[in-house]
Amino acid sequence: QVQLQESGPRLVKPSGTLSLSCAVSGGSISSSNWWSWVRQSPGKGLEWIGEIFHSGNSNYNPSLKGRVTILVDKSKNQFSLKLTSVTAADTAVYYCARRFKTFDIWGQGTMVTVSS
Amino acid sequence: DIVLTQSPDSLAVSLGERATINCKSSQSIFFSSTGFNYLAWFQQKPGQPPKLLIYWASIRESGVPDRFSGSGSETDFTLTINNLQAEDVALYYCQQYYSSPFTFGQGTKLEIE
């Protein structure tokens, strides 16, 4: 059974870069799925951030205005998220998820706070 | 972007009764070439990630009890929970995967009356 686990700093300073990784276990990241990031904040509910295929093809939510980069590392069977120029509005629980049709497997999520 | 609007925002239902949650899309999410509606339903309990319940608007994910059912087409969809159990207390979200950016409804809070 595929499992996902997020990791990364829980506190990021304003104007800094949020960096998270998602480790995939129980399956290969090179399978025919898209690998996504979704965040959840009290003010905006669930928001899809973007996704990547093992080939490196990626799609991003335009609402994040080019601040997002998602990369895949097949050697480590993981993918990552970088969000630049963060503000308090980026404070949220960040989830990684597998998308086959839709988001069928989720990590437990990690709370990231943007604060000085 | 496709906007999904759920109703009601919250509801309280007695144990053993039926709960109905609606989801309206700002545009059709039915793809005629596949014959599918690109809509899913999720359940989220406190401190947990969302759990996929229904996809293609009406197909239950493996392991989901058959008291959960989905219906609807094009722009109007419904999640029905029959014989409500205490463990069904949660937030419920609809989500479209018809087009990027993928979007979610604002959520419906289900409580026991």
Image: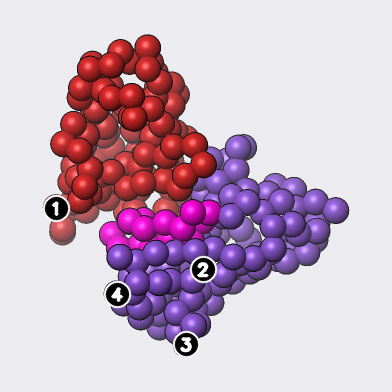
Indicate the amino acid at tag 1: Gly
Principal SS element in the magenta part? Answer: strand
Are callouts 4 and 1 both on one chain? Answer: no
Circle 4/circle 3 CB separation < 8 Å: no
Per the rendered image, the range of residues in magenta is A95-109
Looking at the image, residue B25 lies above or below residue B109: below
Indicate the amino acid at tag 4: Ser
Q: CA distance from mark 4 to mark 1?
A: 22 Å
Q: Looking at the image, which residue is at 37% across and 12% down?
A: B113
For residue A2, which numbered disc appears in the image?
A: none
For residue A22, which numbered disc appears in the image?
A: 2
Measured from the top left, where is residue A106 in percent x and y?
A: 42, 56
Where is mark 3, residue-wise?
A75
Indicate the secondary structure of the residue bearing disc 2.
strand
Measured from the top left, where is residue B66 in percent x and y?
A: 16, 36
Indicate the secondary structure of the residue bearing disc 1.
loop
For residue B35, which numbered disc appears in the image?
A: 1
Chain purple in the figure, letter: A
Q: CA distance from mark 3 to mark 2?
A: 13 Å
Where is mark 4, residue-wise?
A32
Q: CA distance from mark 2 to mark 1?
A: 34 Å
